[in-house]
Image: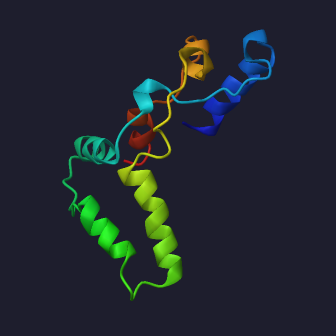
Amino acid sequence: MVEEDIGKYVVKAMDDVRTLNRTIYVRPPSNIKSQMEVVNLWEALSGKTLQKEHISEQQWLQKIQDENLPWEGTIAFSIFYHIFFEGFMLSFPISHDNEASSLYPEVNHVDINSYLSRFL
């Protein structure tokens, strides 16, 4: 999402009685991608193959327990574990009537393909 898209949804929600005293999420289904899906999309758009190193969940957890890792690193690796391995940021369900692109299908938002194409 880009700032302009968020602004469009905010303006729409301000005058909508359906959103009164409710949390509205901006999470268009077309933009929900895994990290690997984003990497694959970038490779397709750019025509380049990126060097990837796959790390298993067990390897990541072992890194957190590394005695030589400073405490800041332990905290960072722990947070990233919850985000990348557990899907912490997107692992909660939201109802169709609490998602902005469902409430306002007439609003055109920047999809992930268009966003990444800006960097080519």
Q: x%, y% of residue 19?
A: 74, 17
**Res. 37 in view:** yes
Residue at x-position 57% and y-position 11%: 106
Q: Foreground: 49 or 95? A: 95
Callout count: 0
Q: Which quadrant is the N terminus positioned in?
A: top right
Q: Work out whether 108 lies above or below 70.
A: above
Q: Quadrant of residue 50?
A: bottom left
Q: Work out whether 110 lies above or below 19.
A: below
Q: Please state if 46 lies on the left or on the right of 77 as rendered.
A: left
Q: x%, y% of residue 90?
A: 47, 39
Instruction: Give the colour scheme shown.
Output: rainbow
Q: x%, y% of residue 7?
A: 70, 30
Q: Foreground: 59 or 111? A: 59
Q: Foreground: 5 or 54? A: 54
Q: x%, y% of residue 24?
A: 66, 26
Residue at x-position 39% and y-position 49%: 86
Q: Work out whether 32 lies above or below 51.
A: above
Q: In which quarter of the image is residue 33?
A: top left
**Res. 104 in view:** no
Residue at x-position 49% and y-position 61%: 79
Q: Please state if 9 lies on the left or on the right of 69 as rendered.
A: right
Q: Foreground: 97 or 100? A: 97
Residue at x-position 47% and y-position 77%: 73
